[in-house]
Image (cartoon, rainbow, N blue to C red):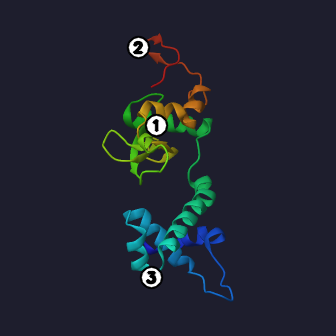
Amino acid sequence: MSEETYVYLCNKLRPTMERQDTPFRECIPLKKRVAIALWKLATGSEYRSIGHLFGVSNTTVCRCVQDFCAAAETLLVPELIRSPDREQFAEMAAYTENRWGLPQCVGAIDGSHIPILAPQEYHCDYFNRKGWHSIILQGVVDGKGHFWNVFAGMPGSLHDARVLRLSSLWELASRGNYFPPCTRNIGGVNAGCYGL
């Protein structure tokens, strides 16, 4: 991550992540709190080793990560990730068709298993087919490779199709929000509405 991006991130998250000193203790500076969270999320290292690296306790590392994720969800997600409206959908579909030759394609979807520690309850549900505990992250990108839908948190034992059926994307697509009525002339025959 460049220093410029890091400073931008700190400034964006300042309203919810910055803490004030008290008469009893000095708070950890915002830049250090963000660095701790980024280190944990980027490396997946244990709280203990990150705490040792930054000179803080395991609990502090955990709080920094939780605060960072909550702040990112509150402040960054609405600004950076949003579902396309009909105009953006038409633009995405045209771009995808022109570049890849896939008419009516609104995106590419895939899932990924994120490793977790086995929870106390229902730990078998999180045991995936690869032999370890995980949650599933499902993402959809447009023709430019930009994420426009992300769904996470389902137990690792679920099949990808089941995760899709449980996601908000399935509900929106079922209501027709991503597949507007259309017709297409293919080889002189009106093919009607179709989609991938």
Q: Position of residue 130 (x, y in %)?
A: 30, 42
Give the Cα separation between the discs numbered 2 and 1: 25 Å
| Kind of residue sitting beneath label 1 | Gly
Indicate which label's residue lies in the foreground, 3 or 1. Answer: 3
Q: Secondary structure at mark 2?
A: loop
Three-letter code, disc 3: Gly
Locate the N terminus by quadrant: bottom left
* Residue toward you, 67 or 142: 67
Callout 3: SS: loop
x, y (%) of residue 184? 50, 19
Q: Is residue 5 visible?
A: no
**Residue at image point 43% right, 66% down:** 40
Q: Is residue 52 above or below residue 109?
A: below
| Closer to the eye: label 2 or 1 | 1
Q: Amino acid at mark 2?
A: Gly
Kindly indicate whether the residue at mark 1 contacts the one at mark 3 (C-beta within 8 angstroms): no
Mark carried by residue 107: 1
Residue 176 is drawn in which quadrant?
top right
Say the numbered circle drawn on residue 55: 3
Residue visible at 41% across and 72% down in the picture: 48
Question: Is 127 in front, or is 191?
Answer: 127
Q: Quadrant of residue 20?
A: bottom right
Q: Where is residue 80? Give x, y as percent.
A: 56, 54
Q: Quadrant of the C terminus?
A: top left
Q: CA distance from mark 2 to mark 3?
A: 69 Å
Whichever of labels 2 and 1 marks the residue nearer the N terminus, that label is 1
| Dot 1 crowding, Cα within 10 Å, few <14, some 14–19, many 20+ | many
Residue 102 horizontal side relative to residue 150, left or right: left
N-terminal label among 2 and 3: 3
- Mark toward the start of the polypeptide (3 vs 1): 3
Q: In percent of the image, x 41 and y 30: which residue is there?
A: 102
